[in-house]
Amino acid sequence: MRIEVRDLTKRYGPQLAVDNISFTVDTGEIVGFLGPNGAGKTTTMKIITNFIAPTFGDVFINGISIREQPNEIKRHIGYLPESNPLYNDMPVIDYLKFVGELLDINNLTGRIKDVIEKVGLYDEKHKKIGELSKGYKQRVGLAQAIIHDPEILILDEPTSGLDPNQIVEIRKLIRELGKEKTVILSTHILPEVEAITDRILIINKGKIVADGTSESLKTQATENESLIVEIEGGSPSEVLSKLNELATVGKVDITSREGNKFEVTSRPGLSSRKDIFTMCVNNNWFLTQLTPVERKLEDIFRQLTLN
Amino acid sequence: MKTIWIITKKELASYFDSLIAYVLIVLFLGFSGFFTWLYGTDIFLIGQVDLRPFFNVAYWTLFFFIPALAMRSVSEEKSSGTIELLLTKPVTDWQLILGKYLANLIVIFIALALTAPYVITLANIGNLDAGATLLGYTGLLFMSSAYIGIGIYASSITKNQIVAFLIALFIGLFFHIIFSVFANNMSGGVAEMFSYLDMSTHFNSISRGVLDTKDVIYFASLTFLGLFFSVLTLSKRNLN
């Protein structure tokens, strides 16, 4: 199912939580929602899931507006809210039964069994939710989100507060679910977005500031080519001056004097790799390292959201 | 209707699982039993086979009992965040509130049904007026319904259950006593208006054995207003 967010705006009193954003998520896509706290991620998710109404704009699920048929749309969405609220005094199986009845699922008993199996809650199914550890609670949260086999999954920080092992397990589960569903998930953990999602949306102060795959964001953000160059055979000052003479080189920084290691920044739009190699050949030097420096998602995130 | 009933069932299960229902029912039976049979102007003193003393005691016990029962209805869902889970399922605000209302009413109904031994005892002592007894219970149920409406409204405006309890009691106090005091201290149309707003006017009229449409409308509108304002409070999340 396709999600289309069109000119969405949400105001809380004088505060603008979401400022006229539009984006589309296609069927089968896993989209990561990134942004600092208070950027509007949760608000956007609450609007898509029909918990709150937008001030302006609309969301279309497969072309159907959430303003027109909220109850029909709700049946196609599985939602794990931020902080994973649950009824602590209810046993896991009763809770899933309650949710399943609200969603009017056929063959509910069989479905509950499948879901419990899928999220790995078999041994805990008769325990009260309040007695479970955080990781298992998260599984219950996921179980209620997928019990009606929804085409769309909205997960608000699904791995927050879990230990590294649990994080890996939940990610694996989400990736598996994402094979057949449209998924939007929000997170603060940047490697997680790279690990799970197909596409990244970075949102800041209610606006979308970046949209693309992690690769495309990285190349977009890297304006000038940057290389780590290590050259042996010549004295550092000689190498440095020759490097500076090259037409394609913009700036040279010395990173380590002993090993003749430099960080070379090329001029905008140009690559100096070839020139550096030719220079080494002409001077009979050995090129021992020529590595492009890759921008990390962290840097891009900071660059886009710190202003 | 099905959705409402699913919510009611879940609500009843949590009342009974968490022992709240048992504790409140035992307290209700304890208090009303004590004042009906053992203390003060008890049932033996008046020398008539009449359940009126019980109805008057229950009228007061329920006044405290219902806010305590209803206080968690919405506020707990709000403070734990589970309201977000419920309302992102195919559940409307009205269905949620009506489900909660029905669950509260059923607990009260069970509490009142458990006073059946009083009726049986009295019927064995002498000639109990069946009609008046039935109407007395009806009056109590009507009154409970109105206070549940108020209690759920109070619970919908705060995340804190104690605050919800106190607000429900505060609003209830007007209908229970304050309007009747106003009515007694004023005259003419104003007095009449306050007398109409006073709950005991309507309760007494029913428990005396007269089921008037006027009284039914009074309790029904109080209940409706309570639930209506609860839904309104819930829907405020959509406003700016």
Image (cartoon, rainbow, N blue to C red):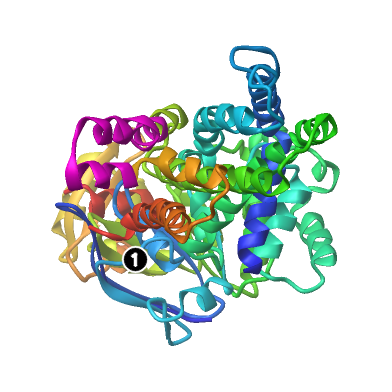
Q: Residues within 10 Å of mark 1 (few under 14, many from 20)?
A: many
Most common SS among magenta residues:
helix
Q: Residue at x 21, y 30 (%)?
A: B185
In the displayed structure, A82 sits above or below B118; it is below
Closer to us: B157 or A178: B157
Most distant residue in the bottom direction: A63
| Residue B50 image position (x, y, % from top left) | 67, 33
Q: Residue at x 48, y 48 (%)?
A: A82
Q: Residue at x 14, y 52 (%)?
A: A14
Q: Residue at x 21, y 47 (%)?
A: A306
Examine the image and state in which quarter residue A48 appears.
Answer: bottom left
| Residue A50 image position (x, y, % from top left) | 43, 66
| Rendered-image quadrant of the N terminus of chain B | bottom right
Q: Which residue is mark 1?
A: A53
| Residue A241 image position (x, y, % from top left) | 16, 49
Examine the image and state in which quarter residue B91 appears.
Answer: bottom right
Amino acid type at circle 1 is Ala
| Residue B131 image position (x, y, % from top left) | 68, 49
Is A159 situated left or right of A250 in this image?
A: right
Is B90 situated left or right of A97 in this image?
A: left
Chain ID of residue with mark 1: A
Answer yes or no: is residue B162 visible. Answer: yes
Closer to us: A18 or B96: B96
Closer to us: B56 or A101: B56
Closer to us: A79 or A163: A79
Answer yes or no: is residue A160 visible. Answer: no
Is A129 situated left or right of A162 in this image?
A: right
**Which residues are the magenta region?**
B167-196
| Rendered-image quadrant of the C terminus of chain B | bottom left
| Element assignment for label 1 | loop
